[in-house]
Image (tube, helix red, strand yellow):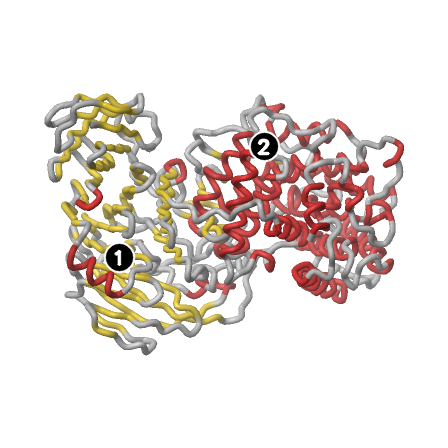
Amino acid sequence: MDLSRRQTLALAGAGAVTSLVASAGGASAAGGGAGQEGGDPYEPLLARAAQQLTGGSFDPRDPDFAAALAALDAEASAWWRRIDTSAGRQALWADLSPASDPGMFGQSYPRLRTLAIAWATPGTSLTGQPAVRDGILDALRFLHTAGYNASRRETGNWWFWEIGAPRALMDVCVLLRADLPQEDRDAYVRTVAAFVPDPDHRTNAPALAETGANRADKAVIVALRGLLAGDPAALALARDGLSDVRGNGQNSLFQYVTSGDGFYEDGSFVQHSNVAYTGTYGSVLLGGAGRLMALLAGSDWAVTDPSVDVLYEAVERSFAPFLFDGLMMDAVRGRAVSREAARDHDDGASAVAHILQLAEAAPRAYADRWRAAAKGWILRNTSTPYRDLVPIPDLARAKALLADSSVRPADRLTGHFVLADMDRVVHRRPSWACALSLSSKRIAAYEAGNGENLHGWYTGDGMTYLYDGDDTDAFADAFWPTVDPYRLPGTTVDTRRRTDLGTGAGTGTFRPKNAVAGGAVLDARHGAAAMELIADGSTLRAKKVWFFLDNAVVALGAGITAGDGRTIETVVENRNLHAGGAPRLLVDGHRQPAEQGWSASLDDARWVHLEGTGGYVFPSGGPLRALREERTGTWRSVNTGADTGGSTTPVTRRYATLWFDHGSSPASASYSYVLLPGATAAATLAWSRSRPARVLANDATVQAVAAPRHGLLAAHFWAAGSVDGLASDGPGTVLVCHRDQGVSVAVADPGRTATVLTVRLPFPVRRVVSADDTVSVTPGRRPVLTVRVGGSRGHTHTALLR
């Protein structure tokens, strides 16, 4: 463990790195190339790059490292046994034929990287084996001749040519550099230089500037080829690419953006112009930028951009709200939710690993908080341990962290987060969290393409993700291939049949026509969010609002109208009960059958309790339906991607579903329900009787609730109106908390249509304690707030009054 700790500390500096890099098969794995002792500035950095891949020195007898080694060995040995070395081969592996196809060579290089890592890492059956080394060198030559070389023109998916293949190829060259003939090295570097001349632009579309994760990936690639070629200009290109020096900073990764790709000051992260993508592309950006910063630290090409704090701030603003016990919430994973090999736990582990890597170069004030948070994430995730999800370098950092008694694990993050610039809302309590996935004419309802996310039709229509600390696998355990994609929790849908999305080449998004999506946050504790639903390919319209309280989420729907002659449904819950789950289901205290296929109409139900999940209260009753069902699907049915396609093996999971049946072509239908995550049956009954939160209005003008115990009054106005003495002269979200210590007010315009909102409060105010500079207050018996919401992009405006 002490050795791992030293290794971890060494990653932050250049001087000590080479002494810790493991030696496998002589100087090649150790990185002891020519010129290192003669002042060569590149070899120490290449040694560091190798260590970033292998993890450096560690004790292979340590059970955690032994398990990671065994996993690496098993994967690499399988590729080694199956590799085709025959003279007339068309591919290296039969399932990746022909090698001339970009999707095939694009997947072949990562397999060779796995082989090279196993060869260069001590403790595997392939470590230092001359036959393995020679086989990799031969395979590189074959792929260069048959598939990836500078004389070819890009076809198919650009990503394989400009990121996937060159990134893996450069990594292999780093690991085998001492045994790689100069002629081969030069040829591979020339190829990568042809397809990735700089990090700034898309090579097959030079007018398109690279942004976000793609820019970070390309910067790493350019840096590695610069080190391999001994080219200082390429290293400068890589470093400056992070800051977009050549583009005057327009696409710098170290800036807040107000539109398009990148980090927003409210914590949002957008990629592909309009997709909420913190959990995948955002994480890739964090990892790529962090790796390059660590790689070049202490050298002539070190990253010194004074705005790098933007990246540091993103850890807590952008990533922490979506990390729940180490998993990454699906609301920000885009089309990646359909990838069998990349569950929420996998992407979460990657994000945690990137954060710990970045901590090595970050100022201590940041790094200390991140390590405490990471320690909590790792320790709490016992169902899918972090150690089983990450490679050896990340495992080494984690073990050093866990062994450091000076770092106290942080508790779960709590609070309410409105990420207005990407239409996402997260409400976090000590034992649970709820994420809301919205969409608008600004932010896509879904992204699909290249065979991915085939059934993502309703994932941005108000899908509600409920995370419980006692069951962190609700969405990880084969949810996407088995859930009914027409009944996603929180959505109101037209039951028409849909065709698969994204079956062609390239990716695409769908943005609905509604303007309203988002809400306001009060005291970082309570919130309200609204979405106007304008359905795709249907006349369905609805006004949907969620109110987030300390222990409950109140969901209201109004104006639900359609004229297509099809049934309209609002889904309250569709809970994954896993393979054999049969938890007790109570309706108004009466136990319901546990048999699969059971269904019932519960029009008069006032409360429901699902064991292990929580309670549901129905203030207005309604056309409620319930179903237990066992569903079978395949990952292939939701993802047929060239390098991400799922298996055809059937998987079966059980579900408990609750929904409102609004009938065929409803006119101004409505619903109301309350989620009580983690509540017991007794607590659910008590809540339904005492009604600590009351629905005050639920119509097409205003939807509102009051929680007297908290002194809270919350409303979303779809037009000018009033409720319980609270009035607004136009559309907007308003929350007011009236307590002995004062009155706090939060106002937002999630539709971004107003310039000024005038809000009247229902109780007297004597003075203003504090207020945003966009808020003017006229105190009195019926105080008036004038809020300049124009240009604020849906963000919250606050005031504290007495």
- Residue pictured at 16% horizontal, 52% vertical: 667
The kind of residue tagged 1 is Thr
553, above or below 654, in the image: above
Q: Which residue is mark 2?
A: 363
Viewer-side residue, 519 vs 274? 519
Q: Earlier in the sequence, mark 2 or mark 1?
A: 2
Q: Residue 585: x and y, percent?
A: 28, 70
Q: Which residue is mark 1?
A: 570
Label 1's element? strand
Q: Secondary structure at mark 2?
A: loop
Decide which of 282, 85 is in the foreground and name it: 282
Image coordinates for residue 296, horizontal then vertical, percent: 70, 33
Q: Is residue 674 visible?
A: yes
Is 635 on the left or on the right of 9, as rendered? left
User: Are circles 2 and 1 on residues that touch, CB within 8 Å?
Assistant: no
Q: Amino acid at mark 2?
A: Pro
Mark 2 or mark 1, whichever is nearer to me: 2
Residue at (72% x, 52% y) in the render: 113
Calculate the distance from the C-alpha at mark 2 to the C-alpha at mark 1. Answer: 48 Å
Direction from residue 371 to residue 21 in the image, left or right: right
Looking at the image, is 305 positioned above or below residue 105? above
